[in-house]
Amino acid sequence: MSLLVLLPTSSFSLKQFLNQQIQQGQATSAQVNYAASIHVISALKLKLKQYTTGSDNWLNSLTLLASKDISATYELAMYYKQVGNEQQYLYWLNLGSKQSYPRAKLDLISFYYQQEQYSQVIAETEFVAIPVNTELNLERIASIELADNFLALRAKALLVHGKMDELIAFQAQFHNEPLYPIIQNVMRHLTEFKVFEHTSTRTDIAALAERTQTKQCPSSISLIATQYEDLEHLKRIKDDFSTHPLSTYICIQQISYAPLHALKCTGDENSAIMCNESYWKLATGSLNTDYIGVMLPRGGANVHLGIMYWDRFDQFEVFIHELSHLLGFIDEYALPSGHNACQPPFGSKGLNIALLDSNQIQSSQTLHSNQISTLERKKIRAEVIKQLAWGNSIKDSTPILTQHEGYWRIGTPEAYASEIGIFSAETCQESDHLTYKPLNMPTALRHTYADFPQEYLDILQDNAIDYAMPSFQYNVALSLYRKDEDEAAERWLRKALINKRNKKHHDMIVTGAINKGE
C-alpha cells in the first residue's frame, strides 16, 4: 500500500501522520521503516524494541533517538557504563547534563565526587533549585529527591574543603527537615561526630586537664577522617579495636574530622603519606589525646612522631601495625639505610628492637672460646641485658651467647628458639649495624598478617610509655620550626613538655633536639 494513498489532504505533515499511525498501532512495517529513516521518534522507539541491546542496529537507533529525546542520551550513558567504556559513558553523561536531564546531572556529579574532584562538585551544585514545600505531587516529590541528593553531595564536598560556614547554614536549614532525609542524615552524622565543634577555643590547659581525667589507659589517640564516608569507617575500626589486646594500652578517645584540602597531604601507593602538620595548631582545644591518627584517600601508611597516617583501603591489620609504632614497637623487616632506628645511640631502639655495639660490651662481636671465661660471659650478659627493653623477660636459663666454630657470638642458641632471647633481626640489614629482637618467629611487626604475640604485650606491660612516641604537639612544633615560625614553635614545645611521654622525649625537647628534626 502506498504511503501517498493514506496521506490525507490536510495541514497534517507526513511525520505527524506517521507518528499518529504508529501510536494508534495502525502503521505497516513499511511505514514504520520509512518513519524511522526520517527520524520520527515513535518509530525509532518501536524499532529499538525489536533490536538486541548492544547490537549495532540498537546502538544506531538509540544514537539517532538521542538527538531527539534526552532520555535516550541517558540510556546510552548507562549502557556504556555497564560495558565499561568510561570515555563514552562520560561523553553521553555530560551531554545529558548539559541538556538539563536531572538523572544525568546527578550521576555526573556523583562521578566527580567518587573521583575526588570536589571543586567540580561544588561548582556543579552551586545553584541547586530547592523545591518550595507546597502541595506535593509525584513530580514535586521527584524534584525534592533529586535536590536532596545534590545537596548531600555538595555538603560532603564542602566538608573536604573545610567550608564550615555553608555547612553550618545547611545544618540549620535541614537538620529537622523530613522532606530531605539524605542531607538531614549527613548533617546528623556531622553533628554526632562533633565536626562543627572541631575548632573549639578551649584553653590548652583545660584540654589537657580533661584528657587526664577521662583517659582510661596509658596512651590515647584521636582518629581523624578527611572525607564524610570515613567517619563511619573509623567508627567500625574503633569498634573492632575495642576487643584487640592493644586496646589496654592505647584508647581511641574520639573520632573527629579535618578538611583534606587544608592538610595539604602528599603521598601515593608508592610513597609515605606526609601532611602539613602545623594545621593541628588550629584544633588544639578539641583534640585531647596524646596522638592523632589520620585516615587519607591514598598513600603509604607510616608514623611520624606523634601522628599516624594510613590509607582508607588498608586492612585492619595495617592499622594495628602502625598503631604499635606509637607504643614503641619497631619494624622487623629491613628499613632503609640511614633510618633513625639504625643509628646510634646504641641500646634498645624500641620495645622489640635493640641496636648493639660490640665495643660497648668490651669485646668483639665474635669472642674466641679460649679467651673468655665463664665470669666474663656473665659480665657480658649483664651488660647486654640492661640495654634491652625486654631484658627482664629473658629467663636466667636462656643463653644470649652462642658458640660457633670456636667463637662466641651474641645471640640465643637455636635450641632455645621458642624462648624470649636475643635473635638477629632484619631491621638494619641495609646499614652497618646489627639489630636484635626478642622472638625467633614472624610477628605483626614483620608481616601484617602475622599475630601480635603475647610476649610483646607482656614487654609492653612492663614498659607502657618508656618507648612510646612523643605527643602530636611535638609534630606541630617541628612543623612550625621548619616554617621559621620560631616563636610559635617554642610555644608548642612548651605544650609538648607538659605532655612529655617519657624522659627521652623530655631531654629531646629541652635540649633543642627538635631543631635537627630528630
Image (cartoon, rainbow, N blue to C red):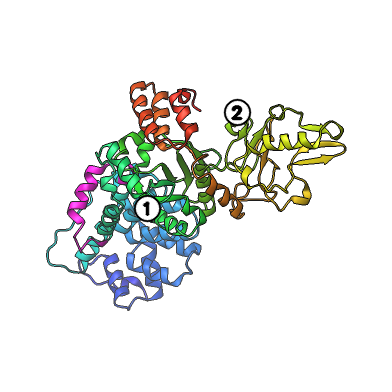
Q: Which mark is residue 197?
A: none
| Mark 1: amino acid | Leu
Q: Which residue is mark 2?
A: 345
Query: Circle 1 sits on which residue?
Result: 231
Judge by depth and name the residue closer to the eye, 492 or 259. Answer: 492
Res. 162 visible in picture: no
Give residue 471's quadrant in the image. top left
- Decide: is 317 above or below 336: below
Decide: is 381 above or below 225: above
Q: Please tell me whether residue 445 is drawn above or below residue 371 in the rendered image.
A: below
Looking at the picture, how far across and down is residue 285, in whole percent?
29, 40
Residue at x-position 76% and y-position 32%:
365
Residue at x 52%, y 50% (from the top left corner): 320
Q: Which stretch is magenta?
A: 159-181
Q: Nearer the viewer, residue 225 or 131?
A: 225
User: What separation in Å lies between label 2 and label 1 (alpha carbons)?
Assistant: 41 Å
Q: Main secondary structure of the magenta part?
A: helix
